[in-house]
Amino acid sequence: MILALFGTNPYPFERLVEFLETLAREEGHEIVVQHGSSRAPDGCQSFDYTSYQRILDLMAKADVVVAQGGYGSSLDALTLGRPLVLVPRLRAMAESLDDQVELVRHLTASGRALSAQTYPEFAAAIAQALSATGGEAGDQEQPFGQAVAQAILDHLEKNGTLPI
C-alpha cells in the first residue's frame, strides 16, 4: 500500500493529485490518500483529515510513504522506517507560500528519501522505493529510523528553527 500525505497546508496540491491518479490508473497500486484541502484523487482511497494516531497506524502498514516537503510527515515516516518519496510544494505553482525544497534536498542528498517534481520522476521514485522493500512493509522499524529522526532534529536545531 502506498500512503500519500498532503498535510494541513491550505493550498491545493493538484500536481500530486494528478501524479497519484496516473499512478493508480497505470500501475494499479493500492493508494490511500490524506488529501487535506485538495480534491480527492480518483482511483484512490481518500480522506481529508484524520487523527495523528491513524496516520501513524497507516504509515506503519505502508510499503511507501509519499509526502509533501514538510518536516512532520518526513520525520514520522523515517522514524517508522518507511521508504519515503517527497514531492515538495512549489510557490511558482501556487501550492504553498514558499518552496518546500530545503529538507527535500537534504534528505535526498543523504540517501534517506527519494524526491520528484515531475510525474516520470515520481513513477521512478515509487518503483525504486517498492523494489527496495520488495513491495511489502516490514513488521519492524528499520534500525536507521531513529538515527534519521535525530538527524532531522539536529538539522532543525542547527538552523534555529526547532520549535520548543
Image (cartoon, helix red, strand yellow):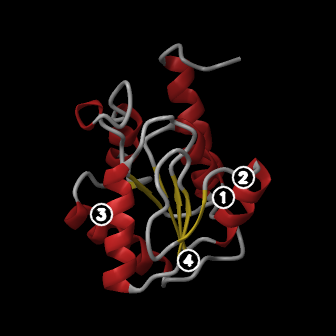
Label 1: state its secondary structure. Answer: loop
For mark 4, give the secondary structure. loop
Assign the N terminus to one quadrant of the image: bottom right
Q: Residues within 10 Å of mark 4 (few under 14, many from 20)?
A: some
Q: CA distance from mark 3 to mark 4?
A: 16 Å
Mark 1 closeness class: few <14, some 14–19, many ≥20 residues within 10 Å: many
- Residue denoted by label 2: 50
Three-letter residue code for mark 4: Met
The amino acid type found where label 2 is placed reads: Thr
Image disc number at residue 80: 1
Is tag 4's residue or tag 1's residue first in the polypeptide sequence?
4
Q: Amino acid at mark 3?
A: Phe
Q: Earlier in the sequence, mark 3 or mark 2?
A: 2
Q: Vertical placement of 30 versus 59: above or below?
A: below
Q: CA distance from mark 1 to mark 2?
A: 19 Å
- Whichever of callouts 3 and 4 sits on the residue coming sooner in the sequence is 4
Q: CA distance from mark 3 to mark 2?
A: 25 Å
Mark 4 and mark 2: span between their CA atoms?
18 Å
Foreground residue among 65 and 9: 9
Q: Is residue 39 visible?
A: yes
Q: Is residue 82 left or right of residue 14?
A: right
Choose mark 3 or mark 2, whichever is in front. 2
Residue for badge 3: 122
Q: Is residue 38 left or right of residue 60?
A: left
Residue 127 visible here? no
- Mark 3 touches mark 2? (CB < 8 Å): no
Dot 4 or dot 2: first in sequence order is 4
Q: Which numbered circle lies on residue 1?
A: 4
Q: Position of residue 156 (x, y in %)?
A: 53, 25
